[in-house]
Image (cartoon, rainbow, N blue to C red):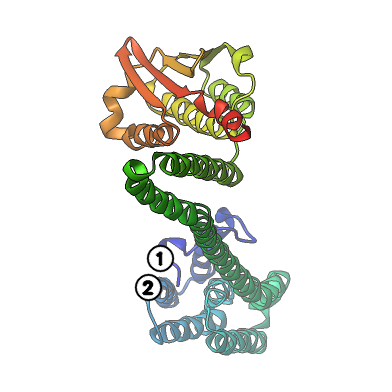
Amino acid sequence: MQKWYTIFPRNPWLSIYAWVIFCLLPFFFIFRSSNLFNGAIGISLLLLFFLSYFFSFRAKSGIVYMWLSFEMVINIVMTLLFGYVYSSIFTAFFIGNIRRPVGFFIMYGLHIFFTIGAIVAGFFIDIHLFLPQVHFIIITVIGVILLPFNLYYRGKRENLEGQLEDAKERISELVLLEERERIARDLHDTLGQKLSMIGLKSDLARRLIKRSPEEAEKELNDIRHTASMALKEVRELVAGIRATKLQDELIRVRQITKAAEMECRIEGENQLGELPVILENVLSMCLKEAVTNIVKHSGATACLILFERRMNEFRLIVQDNGSGLARKAGETTGSGLRGMAERLEFVNGSLGIEVETGTTLTIRVPLVITHQGGEESE
């Protein structure tokens, strides 16, 4: 059941002001009678109704149906004594929140039966009390019939939508687990055999190096060729897992800095040229992490991104004028910086951090992988 503070529906057919009117309206029906005794009875019944309504939201299990029964009895008495049928709307609203089908349909049927029965009896007892408000009584009966169904099936739909979201999350987890297993299988198939071969040939070369240097040299060449092939296959595997272009990442960098109202200056973009896929992927992820940290944690108003291509290495420099991102590394961004360092270590790169007026991250990656293809094609 819902909490007591959701007694008024979140998306009702009527606004919250109309529900407040329903709460105040019974006083008009009670006090239009000059009989003080009847007035005291009416106020007592009204208080009992709202107490029952409150406790029905707090109750659990079968106690709920007991409080609902009290509400129905009070509705009947209020209808017969004062011609006030509108509290049945509150009871109808609560019945619509019952999630057990059997309980819902039983209470729904009983509520309609008692409400219509009390109205019909009231017309026979004092027709002048009911006839002036017959239009509102008809609307109330329609609400008593339709409101519980609307709330019941809306609740079922929300429940199904929640289950669907849980199923989607579970499917995503299973897909992620399957992808991890696939990557593990690919790595095993890619590296397992070749690393085993490298180990065997290394032992053989060590035994042959004194006895037969020529054969040992041949085994070393085979080891070198096998290692090159393994490196190529790993590069292809990593590129197939997630290939990110620096040019695409720069577009996202401009978007995120613009959204953060931060000035972003990019220099050396023309020096990007052709980079090995694995290097471009690692640089893109490092750039994304660096700019995200600047926007989230540095408090900077401007940043500079500089690309430098040198003879044997490529440099990416990310500088900001913030409060010193590296000083907060242990608090907020340590995992991000460690992740960057781990990615760079995979390609024999390095990460340098300087803190002065702001933070400067210097990312260096060697371009030796560019020459690997030449070695393999020889």
State the mark number for residue 301: none
Q: Position of residue 324 (x, y in %)?
A: 32, 18
Which residue does the image show at 42% across and 72% down from the upper left?
A: 57
Q: Is residue 234 above or below residue 116?
A: above
Q: CA distance from mark 1 to mark 2?
A: 6 Å
Q: Position of residue 233 (x, y in %)?
A: 56, 45
Mark 2 lies on residue: 58
Q: Position of residue 323 (x, y in %)?
A: 33, 17
| Quarter of the rendering occupied by the N terminus | bottom left
* Closer to us: 262 or 361: 361
Q: In the rendered image, which quarter is residue 47 located in?
A: bottom left
Q: Position of residue 176 (x, y in %)?
A: 52, 58
Residue lying at 64% horizontally and 73% vertically, measured from the top left: 153
Seen from the viewer's position, the closer of residues 102 and 93 is: 102
Q: Is residue 88 above or below residue 76?
A: above
Residue type, mark 1 in image: Trp
Using the image as rendered, state which of residue 52 and residue 224 is in the foreground: 224
Residue ID for mark 1: 4
Badge 2 crowding class, 10 Å Cα cut-off, few under 14, some 14 to 19, many 20 or more, is some
Question: Which image quarter: residue 141?
Answer: bottom right
Q: Amino acid at mark 2?
A: Arg
Say which quadrant the C terminus sits in: top right
